[in-house]
Image (tube, rainbow, N blue to C red):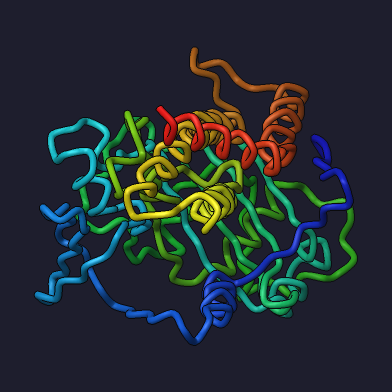
Amino acid sequence: MIGEIEAKGGFRHCGASRAHFLDGLVGLIPPSVKVHFGKKVVDVVASQDGKMQVQFDDGEVFTADAVVGCDGVRSACRRILLGPDNKSANAVYSGKYAYRKVIDMKDVVKAVGTEVENRTIYSGRGGHLLMFPIRAGKALNIVVFRDSDGVPWTQHQWVIPSSREELLRDFEGWGEKPLKLLEVDIPFDFTPFQMSQYLLIVLQLMESPDKWALFDHLPAPTYSKGNFCLLGDAAHATTPHSGAGAGLAIEDAHLLSGLLTSENIKSADDIKFAFRAYDEVRRPRSQELVMRSRRQGMMLDLQKPDGGLVTGEELKRSMEENQDWVWEVDLGQMLQQGKELFRKFSEA
């Protein structure tokens, strides 16, 4: 055991399926808001009358006073806003990939015991394994990260089917005698057991895992241009090693919704001041997250930039400092700063 990272202020972890979480968010949309799914943006153009026109690949065009582009890590809005030749317009490969699988909790508990019901990370040289319960504890989400040792990602798709054999080859040497779950009846009460054996038992459960390339963004010079801005992964896609990518998108939305109020926005022309204030407040923190997440990914893989090996104490200290930075943020103060900047820009 290297250490336990505990949250503060009464915060408790809860794991949710992404699909279930998104369904919950969609359910909060008021009936008065018209929503279209399955649309793909191809261009955003400011017309001569000051309106914004959003063009979709199906030929449809929407006209609006403003556009908030939050179309993910492969954002078309980002390329449009920054320009296709900007070096930060497209996501870049982080040098790491992951295998991911959701497994029925009963199967995992039967194999290795109830320890899997906790949020746990196992670290080793050049890789780490993260697992946590989802679906109200009925399923275990397992993500196994691996450094690519400098090998580029050449596939067009960022998620490709893989195999348990490929996964085990990637982690060859992590265990002395890999246990084959289908051949061995593993008892519940074997304690303590070697971490390497435990890891390999879990990996044996991962039939047909998906292999995910991990991409992120280089720092963009701006998140806004007139009445057009970027939010979430479109603005600051990050690797998942800080567990904060979606959280910072919610921070973005908190600030932006606090600026786009009837108190501030008297006409469509005022929106650009809100977007400019939003950009100035959010860009430093969100771009620092991208850097911190990459660095934490190296720490969890026990890697130092100079090739040295990270110690357990160094990893624990880094994790604690990084998660404090993620969690200990004053959103009220952030909104107040944004409002002051809005007034400054609108009165200039």
Horizontal and vertical percent for residue 258?
A: 57, 52
Name the residue: 83% across, 67% down: 114
Q: Quadrant of the C terminus?
A: top left
Kindly indicate the quadrant of the structure image that contains residue 185: bottom right
Horizontally, residue 50 falls left or right of residue 247, namely: left
Query: What residue is drawn where x is 45% and y is 51%?
Result: 232
Relative image position of residue 235 (x, y in whole percent)? 38, 44
Residue at the far bottom: name it.
31
Between 306 and 217, the residue placed more toward the observer is: 217
Q: Nearer the viewer, residue 163 or 304?
A: 304
Whether residue 209 is visible: yes
Left or right side of 338 for 330: right
Residue 293: x and y, percent?
Answer: 54, 36
Q: Position of residue 247 (x, y in %)?
A: 59, 51
At x 38%, y 57%, the residue is 70
Q: Nearer the viewer, residue 82 or 175?
A: 82
5 vs 291: above or below: below
| Quarter of the image where one finds residue 322 | top right
| Residue at left offset 30%, top offset 42% | 91
